[in-house]
Structures are given as C-alpha cells and as structure tokens.
Amino acid sequence: MLTSHKPPVSKDWLIFAGLVSLLAAMLALSLLAGRVWLPPAEVWRGLWAPRGDLAAAIVMQLRLPRAVLALEVGAALGLSGAALQGITRNPLAEPGLLGVSSGAALGAVIAIYFGWARNVAAVAPLAGLTGALLASWLTFALGSGGGSITLVLAGAAVSALASAGISLALNLAPNPYAAYEIMTWLMGSLSDRSWMDVVLVSPFILVGSVMLLASARALNALALGEAQARSLGIELRLVYALVVFGTALSVGSSTAVTGAIGFIGLVAPHLVRPLVGHQPSRVLLPAALTGGVLLLFADVGTRLIPTGSELKLGVLTSLIGTPFFFWLVVRLRKMAP
C-alpha cells in the first residue's frame, strides 16, 4: 500500500510566517496606540469605510502613513545592515558605516540651514537623498578595488567629513530657530509625516532593496573570502557597487525623510541570524522584516512613554540599541582567540 509523505515545512518559512505575523500585530498596534487610544472598531471603520469623522482622519491621515513609513524605513535599515555585515564580514557593520546616513543628514541640514525647506516641504528630503548619493559615490570611488577594509575606511572618512559639515552648519546657524530645527531633525522622528513622504521615499527604497537582494549569491561567496569569491566568478566591484548604491538609495532616502535613526540596521540581523543560520543570503529578508518590527515597536514607544513632549525616535532607538551594542562587543571579545 502506497503512502504519501508530505515534505516537512521549511524552518525558514516558519520563521518568515512568524515575522510577518509579528509585523502585522505591530502595524495594528501602531494604528490603535497614541495619546488617544482608538477602539479597534473605529480603526476598522476608518480604514475601510471612512466617514470623514475625527477617528477616520486620525487613522488615515496621521497613523497609517506613519506606520507604513516606519515599516518601510525599518525594513530598509534591517536589509542594508544585513547586506553590509555580509559584504564586510564585520558583525558591527551598519548603514552608517559607508557614510550614507551622514551624507543624507548633511544634505537635509543644508536645505534647512539656507531656508529652502520652509518654502517647499520636499526640498529637505530631496537634498538629503542627493547628499546620500554623493556620499556613496565618494565612498565607492575611494574604496573600490581595495577590498572590504578599504571600503570601510573610505566610508569612515566620508562620514567624518559629513559630520564636520553638520557641526559647521550648527556652529554658523543664522538664528536659534534654525539651530533648533536642525537639531530636532537630526534626532529622527516619524511624527507629522504624511502620505507625500511615503510616496517620495517608496520608489527609492524599492529600487535600493532590489539591488541589495540581488547581491545575495555574491554575499554567500564572499563569506569564504575575497580570493575564493573571485575564483567562483564573482565580480567584486559589481557586488560592492550594488551594496553601496543600494544602501544609498534605501537608507539615504529613509534618513532624508525621517532624520537619523541608529542601531536598527545593526541589531536586526543579529536577532535573526541565530534562527536562520550564518549564510548571508538567508539573513537578508528576515532582517528586513525584523527591522520593520523594531522600528514600529520603537515608534509606538515614543507615543506611549509619558514625557512632556514626544520622545524622538532616534533617541529611543539609541537608548534601546546601545546596551545591545555593548553586549555584542563583550560577546565578540569572549569569542576572540
């Protein structure tokens, strides 16, 4: 008698399903939570049958675009962090490593400094994206051809240059209001973001994410070393370009809209790596989902923590991420020979 045996469900698919479920739960919580909690029934009506009342306006114009933006930005940070840790073979790598975040911040700060952002709201994000692309181009021009270590050093130099430009803008701010506006933007936030920001950032995150995912096979080969990757037919210059400019498009556009948000790109890959294994390609998508969960969780936290004014998102992610960073450093020190 013949018996059919169903193949076991892949562990990766179980992890993927769990992360998607957790992400859906955080999205729902993001729509419910705030200074004013909304009943689930009101949120449901606001999503599917908006009546033009206050609850519908809160859901559709305030909380939903904020939640979508948190999901996209968190996913971009998590995916970029996983790709950078794979290409540099450095567990402490994160999107700010290549100077992309600092370049985006400098571009937006320049727009704020000269008052361009006051006239047209999209000027600051576009200037930030331009800064990210210029920073990534400079990093790639300086570091390509010299291996991952040279690329990291070039990114550190570009990041230091952009940070110096930001400090100069703060030092020479024409008035206290401009300095305050720059500092507020640098702390990162998703408050007061609209559908225009979602529309502006989504194409760049999508293209950048596709470029990062396209490097998956090469990242697996690079885990064996650069010489071994070349022997397998991997064109390293192309791989570096995909990761650098993919990070520039996804993280640069995100930073240009939300301001500087740290540690998500560092933490997300490490949370999923013990579950999926240490093969870089298997970490990419779970890290993106985890990044979205973490940023949604942090954004809900900024609304619920009782403070006089809303806690800035970049401040909260740093407070949460710094202890993890210390733990990771101690763990790596214990593992060192």
Image: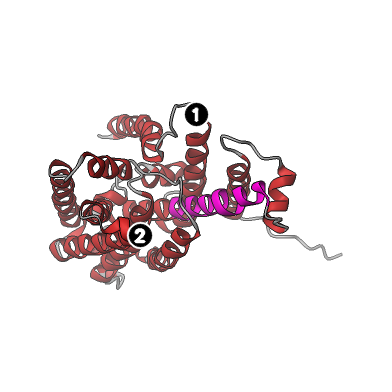
From mark 2 to mark 1, how far is it between C-alphas?
28 Å
**Point 63% across, 36% down: residue:** 37
> Which quadrant of the structure image shows residue 202?
bottom left
> Could you tell me residue 311's position as x and y percent?
42, 34
Q: Which residue is pictured at 36% across the width and 35% down the height?
A: 315
Residue at position x 19%, y 42% in the image = 175
Residue lying at 71% horizontally and 58% vertically, measured from the top left: 48
Total count of labels: 2
Looking at this view, is 272 or 40 the one in front? 40
User: Which residue is more in the foreground, 94 or 30?
Assistant: 30
- Quadrant into which the N terminus falls: bottom right
What residue would you read off at disc 1? 305
Horizontal arrangement in the rendering, residue 301 relative to residue 96 (left or right): right
* Residue 222 in view here: no
Q: Badge 2 is on which residue?
A: 253
Q: Which residues are magenta?
A: 53-75
SS state under label 1: loop
In percent of width and height, residue 178 lies at: 24, 45
Q: Secondary structure at mark 2?
A: helix
In the image, what residue type sits under mark 2? Answer: Ser
Give x and y (percent) for residue 56.
66, 51
Quarter of the image with the C terminus in it: top left
Is 167 situated above or below 282? Answer: above
Mark 1 surroundings: few (<14), some (14-19) or many (≥20) residues within 10 A: few
Q: Amino acid at mark 1?
A: Ile
> Quadrant of residue 217 in the image?
bottom left
